[in-house]
Image (cartoon, rainbow, N blue to C red):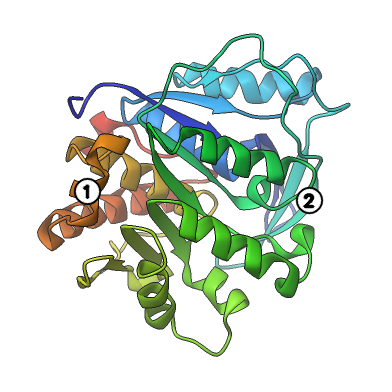
């Protein structure tokens, strides 16, 4: 398969974000970590399908229009929730977000169309952990392993998913089942308070994935590969509007970069496991640029390929 061919399938929540700023002003706009990844991929020119759980209400229509306007194909289910979920992000004076959720998560029992077989399947965040849909997400990943690269971003929300002891085994099982993991240092501090991000990345890279990337906020990102390569790249310095969607845009950039390098698809799994460190560094530096553009403007607003070029 050529690097530019194929589709991405993203599985996970799409919802409405209400942003409450330090000065008391409020905005409402579409969000959800997996939906943001699909949006980022579409803006980078990729064909992205989103398997999600939206209500037939005004918020659901807002989310669909937002995603489809950027080229995301939202798969329609035959069942859905009573209302579209919402997340409220409270921003401090530095623009850093903390979240409160009104969330219901599942997957439709059946879709009115089958997604085109994907070259890559991505999931993460609440969708991979919250019952009842979390177990079905794992089933979907297993169903696609024979044909697709699998990617995962824990993007943990302790206020909605519950205690660390309950969730750590699920996260570790997902990490071992996929090819690429992107995780934040904040997530790792919650999961493993007595280990450094580098130590966890080393361990995870020997547990199954070909590549583990840890984002470090203003300190950039580090990576470990199954082959033992280690590297770290700096963050781009920009004025920060807020950090909403920064990690999701980085994740979309990571998938896009591996796609451009011809490393996605199950047939390229061996090549991904032996990826050259220079290729990873080039991809991560581009991811840092993508994240920097995202944090320089309000909300989860990832760049297009034209903006990057």
In the drawing, does residue 89 fall left or right of residue 57?
left
Q: Secondary structure at mark 2?
A: strand
Determine the image quadrant of residue 45: top left
Q: Secondary structure at mark 1?
A: helix
Q: Quadrant of the N terminus?
A: top left
Few, some or many residues within 10 Å of mark 2 (<14, 14–19, 20+): some
- Image location (x, y in percent) of residue 306: 24, 29
Few, some or many residues within 10 Å of mark 1 (<14, 14–19, 20+): few
Determine the image quadrant of residue 281: bottom left
Q: Which residue is mark 2?
A: 101
Disc with the residue nearer the chain's start (1 vs 2):
2
| Residue nearer the viewer, 280 or 291 | 280
Q: Which residue is mark 1?
A: 270
Kindly give the residue lying farthest to the front in the view shown. Answer: 146
Q: Which mark, by number, is residue 124?
A: none
* Callout in the foreground (1, 2): 1
- Image location (x, y in percent) of residue 58: 78, 20
Circle 1/circle 2 CB separation < 8 Å: no
Whether residue 47 is visible: yes
Whether residue 17 is visible: no
In the drawing, does residue 284 fall left or right of residue 23?
left
Taking the spot 55% from the left edge, 90% from the top edge, the residue there is: 194
Taking the spot 74% from the left edge, 24% from the top edge, the residue there is: 108
In the drawing, does residue 257 fall left or right of residue 194?
left
What is the C-alpha distance between the residues marked 1 and 2?
39 Å
């Amino acid at each position: 398969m050529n690097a530019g061919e194929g589709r991405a399938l993203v599985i996970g929540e799409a919802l409405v974000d209400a942003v409450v700023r330090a000065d008391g002003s409020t905005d409402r706009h579409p969000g959800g970590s997996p939906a943001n990844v699909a949006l980022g991929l579409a803006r980078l020119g990729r064909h992205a399908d989103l398997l999600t759980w939206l209500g037939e209400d005004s918020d659901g229509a807002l989310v669909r229009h937002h995603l489809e306007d950027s080229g995301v194909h939202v798969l329609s289910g035959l069942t859905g929730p009573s209302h579209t979920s919402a997340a409220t992000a409270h921003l401090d004076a530095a623009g850093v977000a903390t979240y409160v959720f009104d969330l219901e998560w599942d997957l439709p029992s059946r879709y009115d169309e089958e997604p085109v077989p994907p070259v890559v399947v991505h999931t993460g965040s609440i969708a991979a952990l919250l019952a009842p849909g979390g177990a079905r997400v794992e089933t979907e990943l297993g169903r696609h392993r024979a044909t697709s690269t699998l990617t995962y971003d824990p993007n943990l929300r302790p206020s909605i998913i519950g205690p660390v002891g309950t969730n750590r085994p699920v996260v570790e099982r997902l990490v071992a089942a996929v090819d690429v993991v992107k995780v934040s240092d904040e997530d790792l501090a919650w999961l493993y308070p007595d280990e450094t991000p580098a130590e966890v990345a080393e361990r995870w890279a020997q547990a199954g994935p070909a590549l583990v990337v840890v984002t470090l906020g203003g300190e950039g990102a580090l990576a470990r590969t199954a082959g033992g390569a280690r590297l770290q790249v700096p963050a781009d310095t920009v004025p920060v509007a807020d950090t909403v969607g920064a990690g999701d845009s980085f994740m979309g950039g990571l998938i896009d970069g591996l796609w451009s390098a011809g490393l996605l698809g199950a047939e390229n799994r061996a090549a991904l496991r032996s990826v050259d460190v220079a290729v990873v560094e080039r991809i991560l530096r581009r991811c840092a640029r993508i994240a920097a553009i995202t944090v320089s403007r309000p909300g989860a607003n990832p760049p297009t390929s034209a903006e990057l070029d």
